[in-house]
Amino acid sequence: MVVIANAHNELIHDAVLDYYGKRLATCSSDKTIKIFEVEGETHKLIDTLTGHEGPVWRVDWAHPKFGTILASCSYDGKVLIWKEENGRWSQIAVHAVHSASVNSVQWAPHEYGPLLLVASSDGKVSVVEFKENGTTSPIIIDAHAIGVNSASWAPATIEEDGEHNGTKESRKFVTGGADNLVKIWKYNSDAQTYVLESTLEGHSDWVRDVAWSPTVLLRSYLASVSQDRTCIIWTQDNEQGPWKKLY
C-alpha cells in the first residue's frame, strides 16, 4: 500500500494510474494536477501542472501509442492537454469550446485514434480529434438540456456494414445528465456526427456518473449512479435490442 500524504492543498477529485500502472495523476480544487511515480511501496512527485483557473475535476491518460499524454478538465470550462517529452511536462493544447464547467473527459479506445470525449454543464458534449499538425476538429452535440455530468466510451467493436458488404467501426458512448436521463449516442458516418440511439429512464434525480463496461462481452453493460442514491446496471443483448435494467 502506498499512502501519499498532503498530495494537494485542497480536496482531491480524481486519481488515475497510467496504462502501465507506474504513474499516478491526481487533480484537485487547488487548480493543480500532480504526477507521481509509483513503484512498490514508494512514490515520488514528478511534476505539478498548473494552467487551470478553477477546480480540476477529472484527468485521463491517453493510450501510450500516442505518447505520454494526459487530459484534464476543470470548472473553468477548459480541457488542457499535457505531454511529457525528455522528462519535462508541458501544455500542448487547449480545448475551450464549452461555456460552463467541463465535468468529464475520457480518451476513446485507441483503435479510434486520439479522440477525446468531453461533457459539460452547458448541456453539450464534444468529441475532439487531434490532428498530426496539432489542430483539433471538434464535433459538438446538444446532449442534456440542463447539463451533462459524465460521459463514457463503449469498447471498440466492429459491426456488419450491409450497405457496402463489409464491416465498420461502431463508435458509441453514454452520457448522464441533470435531466435525470441516461443517453446512448452512436456515430453516423454519413452525417459525420453522433446521433441519439437510446434514452434510458430510471433515475429520479441528477445522473452523476456513467460507465460503459470496457470489456467486449456477449452483452453490453452500463452502470449509472444518481443523486437519488441508486445505482442502475443496464444490459443490452444485441446491437439492435432494447436496454433493460438488470439491477
Image (cartoon, rainbow, N blue to C red):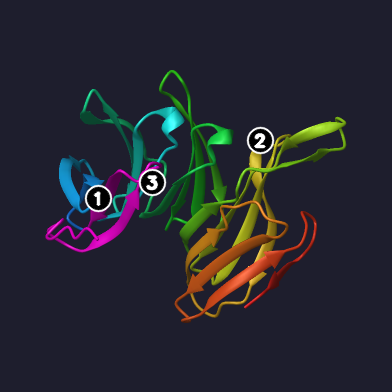
Q: Quadrant of residue 103?
A: bottom left
Indicate whether 8 appears above or below 46: below
Q: Residue at x 49, y 33 (%)?
A: 114
- Asked if residue 131 lies left or right of residue 155, the reply is left
Residue 72 position within the rendered picture, expressed as x and y whole percent measured from the top left: 33, 45
Q: Quadrant of residue 149?
A: bottom left
Q: Nearer the viewer, mark 1 or mark 3?
A: 1
- In this view of the protein, can residue 184 be seen by the observer? yes
Task: Identify the mark nearer the N-term, 2 or 3.
Answer: 3
Q: Dot 1: within a 10 Å radius of its alpha carbon, few (fewer than 14), some, or many (20 or more) residues? A: few
- Asked if residue 86 lies left or right of residue 110, the reply is left
Q: CA distance from mark 1 to mark 2?
A: 46 Å
Asked if disc 1 and disc 3 are in contact, CB closer than 8 Å, the reply is: no
- Does the magenta segment cover residue 58? no
- Does the magenta segment cover residue 19? yes
Q: Nearer the viewer, residue 95 or 23?
A: 23
Q: CA distance from mark 2 to mark 3?
A: 25 Å
Residue 230 position within the rendered picture, expressed as x and y whole percent measured from the top left: 51, 80
Residue type of the residue flagged with mark 3: Asp
Residue type of the residue flagged with mark 1: Gly
Q: Nearer the viewer, residue 231 or 121?
A: 231
Q: Which residue is mark 3?
A: 60
Q: Which residue is mark 1?
A: 40
Q: Which residues are magenta?
A: 1-28
